[in-house]
Image (cartoon, helix red, strand yellow):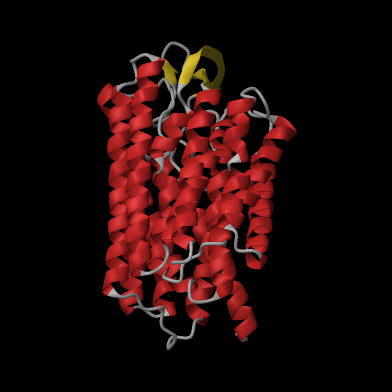
Amino acid sequence: MPVASRTIAASLAAALGAALAAFVLTVPPGGHWAVNASDRQFDSWLDAQPTGVAVGAVIAVATCILLQRSGSRRVGWAAAAMATLVLLGARLTVPGVSDFDALTALHYLKTAAAGVLLGSVVATAWAGRAGQWATTLGAVAAFLSAQASGMATLTFTTSSVGEPSWWLLGPTLALAIASAVTADAGTRIQRVSGPEARGALLTVVALAVVNRLQLSWINERGSDSRLHVWVVLGVAMVVVLVATEVCARLVERESGGGAFLLATTGVAAAAMPVLVDLRDPFREVSPSVVVAVATGAVAVGLRLAGRWRTPVAGLGVAALVPLLAAIWPDFGHDGPWLLVRLAVLGVGAGLAVGSTLPGVAAVAAAGFTIPFVSMVFYSAATVATSTVVHSGAYEPLRGGPTLSAHTPETGWTAYGFDYPGFDYRSAGIALAIAVAFCAFGVRGLRAPR
């Protein structure tokens, strides 16, 4: 295969592989379902969602480090292909699963495979500029659009956003195999030093554990007053942001990639108001349009980053989303204006992330996982008010476990939604402050000394 064709295939594999991993690792906490399962089974399934993401994030960085220490590009693409094959096998297995315990086990398997996939793609593609841009585009665009693909009524699923599409699984597997076959076996993946590896691994472990523990603490306060919940959330967000700043300074000292960690954290905070709206089961905007807008907007942001490396400006553009929520809480929750908000967010995210891409692949892998483990930010965006909308639908039972209620006398499944209104104004203020914190942190790290 000519070098140009090989580069194009590898770049497409990197973009789709990062997007697939991002889809699997996009598991927003929370939700309300009536289910045909015991309390123990359902609680285990809910607890497994964020825990699996935290495990997958750590595996992504560990995989990247292992490949950087000893792997060739062919080995890296082979690992990506194997991880994709596991995800494809899980997709085939889900409809035949008989209970929630098996769904929970499959969820852990999927998030581990997604971690291997993301780590392999980053390690293998990061040496070249085209690979960096493709990986960034796939990961960021999928993070911004994955929740739109979630089904309004979830059946036969290991995740609260549903299973990845065959149109994503198939091409990713084919391109990963093609890249492995055509890769130059003698070309090695970028090396990583001991301090660089330790900094990246400590960062992802610290942020994953801190977010998971803070989420458990927040969930325990679910029945408290709204004021008390916001006090708890405020403390949790401060803990997360301080931990991120400490990790960014550690990484900056070892490898110079601390600004990337702060940029992805800021993007995660800015994105939450839009992501919550995209998860609305009664949203009128189609998933395909959401994916197209997110991908195009992030691509524009990356193109701007190629000319002007201005991460603070990118975070400023992204911060318009939570600021708008704080100033005008009722604006743009559906329809064309939701797409406009998504486009603004995508341009800002692409500019901020693209302007801070690190030279070390392990640091890049750690940064790409931050939006998925940012569970505290999602909790801040989903503090409920007293407004509740109820709706429902009916569909014949097909057998097997469902995230729905079984009506034995009719043999039908009833889907009930207790869909709360959210405290958009308070969430917008809190998340805008988080973005500002990250922007000041990036500016401090990039200031001349």
Camera-nearest residue between 314 and 1: 314
Is residue 156 left or right of 278 when viewed as pictured? left
Q: Residue at x 49, y 37 (%)?
A: 433
**Residue situated furthest bottom in the rendering:** 186
Give x and y (percent) for residue 72: 39, 80
Does residue 365 sit above or below 227 in this rendering? below
Q: Quadrant of residue 255?
A: bottom left
Whether residue 73 is visible here, answered yes or no, is yes
Q: Is residue 310 above or below residue 224?
A: below
Q: Nearer the viewer, residue 26 or 354?
A: 354
Residue in the image at 48% along x and 66% along y: 448
Q: Is residue 335 above or below residue 395?
A: below
Towards the viewer: 97 or 288: 288
Image coordinates of residue 436 in percent, x first then y, are 51, 43
Image location of residue 57, percent across then percent down: 36, 53
- Identify the residue shown where x is 65% and y is 56%: 301
On the question of residue 88 being in view, the answer is: no
| Quarter of the rendering occupied by the C terminus | bottom left
Q: Is residue 354 above or below residue 415?
A: below
As drawn, the residue found furthest toward the right would be 336
- Horizontally, is 301 left or right of 81 in the view? right
- In the figure, is residue 272 to the left or right of 31? right
Q: Residue at x 33, y 28 (%)?
A: 218
Q: Position of residue 316 (x, y in %)?
A: 60, 46
**Quarter occupied by the N terminus:** bottom right
Number of on-image labels: 0
